[in-house]
Image: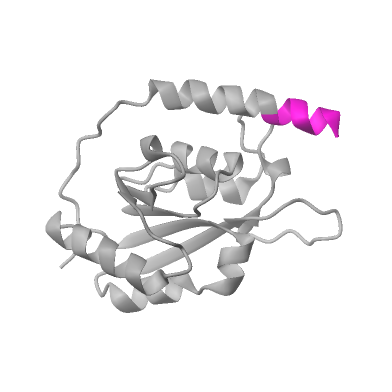
Amino acid sequence: MALEKLRKQFLLKKFQKELSLTPETRTPNSKQIHSVAILTTLELFEEIDIAELIHYNIKSIRSVQVYYFKAFRKSDAKDFKHFTEKDIDWSGKVKDVSLESFIDNPFDLLIGYFDVHNLYLEYCALKSKATFKIGFANVNDKLYDLVVSEDPKNIDSFIEVIKKYLELLHKIE
């Protein structure tokens, strides 16, 4: 248990260092959004089918991929839609090939669909190569280009807000 705490402290330092190196403002591009990546928790993934709702409500979206975080248990089978704390080592290196592929994929939009601090989800959002990032206001504003102050359980309102802003930014039609 002490080793896990130490590993998390090292990763937190790495995260804070990389976050401090990110520019205060990112230059938005005018690229249309067609591919969406969603980072979320197991609980929200099981409760809300966000991928289907995003795909249904924003017509220009061609593909939606969801990757969720869940706590590691030896009895769980490995799945290519989730990752655990064991998939990122103490130095911030991603050990899981599918997670690394997800992070390195240049999605048009990344949605950080979690409203509680989670070092592993925040680290993946930071490392993501997505060109535009949206997340919740009470997590970490520096990770995202657009932050939404909404309850994640209120998915319809969340989608309406992001749809409105994406239309204003000419990222969707």
Tell which residue pokes out farthest to the bottom in this image. 56
Q: 40 or 172: which is nearer to us?
A: 40
Q: Report if residue 2 lies within the magenta region.
A: yes
> Where are the magenta residues, as a range?
1-8
Residue 8 in the figure: left or right of residue 171: right
The spot of residue 3 in percent (x, y) is 82, 28
Q: Quadrant of residue 44?
A: bottom right
The spot of residue 150 in percent (x, y) is 38, 59
Which scheme is used to colour this image of the protein?
one colour
| Main SS class of the magenta portion in the image | helix
At 53% from the left and 38% from the top, the residue drawn is: 123
Residue 104 can be seen, yes or no:
yes
Q: Quadrant of residue 87?
A: top right
Up-down relation of residue 86 to residue 45 (above or below): above
Q: 110 or 48: which is nearer to us?
A: 48
At 20% from the left and 64% from the top, the residue drawn is: 164
The image quadrant where one finds the C terminus is: bottom left
Q: Report if residue 165 lies within the magenta region.
A: no
Up-down relation of residue 112 to residue 59 (above or below): above
Q: 149 or 100: which is nearer to us?
A: 149
At 44% from the left and 42% from the top, the residue drawn is: 128
Up-down relation of residue 150 to residue 72 (above or below): below
Residue 73 in the figure: left or right of residue 48: right
Total label count?
A: 0
Residue 19 in the figure: left or right of residue 27: right
Residue 170 in the figure: left or right of residue 22: left
The image quadrant where one finds the N terminus is: top right
The spot of residue 13 in percent (x, y) is 59, 22
Residue 61 can be seen, yes or no:
no
